[in-house]
Amino acid sequence: MALSDGVFAIAVTLLVLDIDVPPGLNSAGFHEALGDVLSNLGAYALSFAVLAGFWRDHRAIFHRVRLVDADVIWLTVLGLGLAALLPFPTALVSEYGDQRVSVVIYSAAVASLGAVHLALAAVVARRPWLHGDAEPLRNEGLYAVDAGATVVVFVVTIPLALLVGPPAMWWWLVLVPVKVWLGRKEDAEAAR
């Protein structure tokens, strides 16, 4: 877990490196540069939320893992590689959010990370010898719907971005009510 926590922490830290205002600007230049930072802050906030969600999910998956096999190791390393890569597509969306290819690359990265997490959760759930009698931290069915919704939304964004361009990013907002609904459903099940 320490390696995973470290990779997510570094990835989140790298996100903030693109946010800066050059020194030595006059008042007008300062205000213009500050306005330019807004897109960087939006991309940072989005990717911070994405990485935080995947980190939480990763910890929930491994909460009950007692043994690992080659598939778990391979999927974990692949997922960590994708998490570490996310600052790059974030920078693309931040600096070139008006370009279709930036939206496509970001969407592909997030969808890939989600697919790997979904596969990892499925491997752990289907191999009882990896977790023994330990109970899952989250409802596995609801987690599958949650992760699957993330993957579907970001995969659908790819052809949308090719058709309509960068406004396809608005499609990502579909995840807000879905995640709220799933969170409430999970809370209601936990209260029982």
Image (tube, helix red, strand yellow):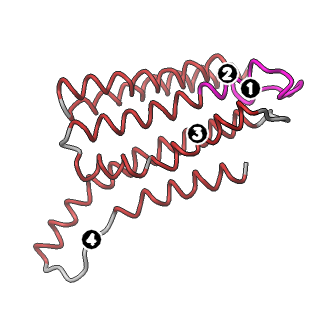
Mark 1 or mark 4: which comes first in sequence?
Answer: 4
**Which label lies toward us, 1 or 4?**
1
Residue 157 location (% of width, % of height):
32, 26
The answer to whether marks 2 and 1 mark residues whose Cβ atoms lie closer than 8 Å is yes
Labelled pair 3, 2 in contact (Cβ < 8 Å): no
- Local SS, label 2: helix
Residue at image position (27%, 41%) is: 102
Q: Which residue is mark 4?
A: 21
- Of residues 69 and 98, the one drawn nearer to the viewer in this rendering: 69
Q: Which residue is mark 2?
A: 122
- Residue at the far left in the pictured view: 28
The residue tagged 1 is: 124
Image check: 67 left or right of 172? right
Q: Label 3, label 4: how many angstroms apart (C-alpha)?
A: 34 Å
Q: Give whichever of 169, 165 is nearer the camera.
A: 165
Please name the residue that numbered disc 3 is placed on.
78
**C-alpha gap between disc 4 and disc 2:** 44 Å
Mark 3 vs mark 2, foreground winner is 3
Q: Which residues are magenta?
A: 118-138
